[in-house]
Image: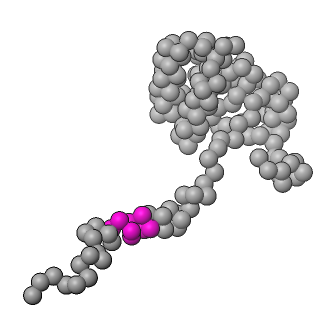
Amino acid sequence: MGRPKFHKLYFPGLISLVFLPALCIGYFLYACFFNRPLGINVIWGNDSMIKSWGKFQKQLFNVNTFRKFNNCLLTGNEIKDKSILTDFERNIKKLGFSGDTINGFSLSFAEHTKYEDVITSIDICAQFENTGISYILYENKILVWKGQPIKSPPIPPRLRSMPL
């Protein structure tokens, strides 16, 4: 006998080529990977906003006396800024594992700091939020500490319905 007559209808690997992507897409739809928000809520604060946060929490918050912040400065120099950002990430990781509630880290932005470095530093802070690290964007810097975050006042009802 020989091969069946329909041997040209099936090519080896055709089943896995068709069903494997369909299986993956089905799993991603089931796990809601396509509906996840891809953003970070960021509020850039100033002195008046800090005062309103203090009134909302019924506790005074003074940026200058809250913690002892070790300050670093991003100047716009690509090589130095890259090393400063890696040190900043390493220090935040150490702060997350330690129980230090006295010290914190501050990253200041100069006039010529690149936009991507600002976004990278915010992303670094957001990655460690679940480890007890809190941060606030205050004037031209980011303040990072171990402890309770500053809760922002609730959004007024008229702004809740506005799209982002």
Q: Residue furthest right?
A: 158
Q: How is the image coloured?
A: one colour
3 lies left or right of 84: left
Q: What segment is highlighted magenta in the picture? A: 16-23
- At x 44%, y 68%, the residue is 22
Q: Position of residue 143 (x, y in %)?
A: 65, 25
Q: Count of labels shown? A: 0
64 lies left or right of 5: right
Q: Residue furthest bottom?
A: 1
In-front residue for pair 30/53: 30
Q: Is residue 5 above or below residue 153?
A: below
Whether residue 36 is visible here, answered yes or no, is: yes
Quadrant of residue 76 within the rendered picture: top right
Q: Position of residue 160 (x, y in %)?
A: 83, 52
Q: Is residue 79 above or below residue 124?
A: above
- At x 32%, y 69%, the residue is 14
Whether residue 106 is visible here, answered yes or no, is: no
For the N terminus, give its image quadrant: bottom left
Quadrant of residue 144 within the rendered picture: top right
User: Is the magenta region chiefly helix, strand or loop?
Assistant: helix
- At x 83%, y 47%, the residue is 155
- At x 39%, y 70%, the residue is 19
Judge whether residue 33 is colored magenta. Answer: no
Q: Is residue 110 above or below residue 91?
A: above
Quadrant of residue 68 within the rendered picture: top right
Q: Is residue 75 above or below residue 162?
A: above
Q: Position of residue 4 (x, y in %)?
A: 19, 84
Judge whether residue 18 is colored magenta. Answer: yes
